Amino acid sequence: MSNIPADLSYTAEHEWIAAPGAEGSVRIGITDHAQGELGDVVFVQLPQVGETVEAGAAVGEIESTKSVSDIFAPVSGEVVAVNERLEDEPAVVNSSPYEDGWLFEVRPSSDDYRSGLLDAEGYAAQLG
């Protein structure tokens, strides 16, 4: 069974969203289930800081030894940070998907950005 932290929100596309931080931004990554399905991550392409993203739109890619998968923005807003560590160490997505392997941060353009997201129980149910 995948690790599914209860304090995060999730998307059907296997991304997690952490609660807003001090600056009002949310941290985004891929779930333990997603990294397991991908296999060894060898490259990560992330959106640029300052870029405006739309919920549901592809904003980057994760390349593994098995495939290339799109990264989708789970919320609309402005990208305020990216995990630069992934440029040199993309495999940290596999070893620490919820901590060191986060992907990027977005300052949501709306307070209701959580509508349509799943809680841990809903995400677990989706996985079966």
Image (cartoon, rainbow, N blue to C red):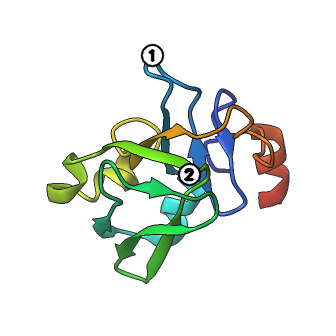
Where residue 74 sits in the image (x, y, percent)? 61, 53
Where residue 33 sits in the image (x, y, percent)? 59, 57
Q: In the drawing, what numbered circle is on residue 22?
A: 1
Query: Do the CB atoms of the residues marked 2 and 1 lie less than 8 Å apart?
Result: no
Residue that appears at 65% across and 27% down: 7
- Closest to the camera, between mark 2 and mark 1, is 1
Question: Against 102, is 7 above or below?
Answer: above
Q: In the visual, does 99 lie left or right of 84? A: right
Residue that appears at 30% across and 56% down: 48
Provide the residue designation for mark 2.
Answer: 31
Q: Residues within 10 Å of mark 1 (few under 14, many from 20)?
A: few
Residue in the foreground of this view, choosing between 100 and 114? 114
Decide which of tag 2 and tag 1 comes sooner along the chain: 1
Amino acid residing under circle 2: Thr
Q: In the drawing, what numbered circle is on residue 85?
A: none
User: Circle 1 — which element?
Assistant: loop
Residue in the foreground of this view, choosing between 63 and 104? 104
Q: Residues within 10 Å of mark 2 (few under 14, many from 20)?
A: many
Estimate the spatial distance between the alpha carbons at disc 2 and disc 1, rounded to whole Å.
23 Å
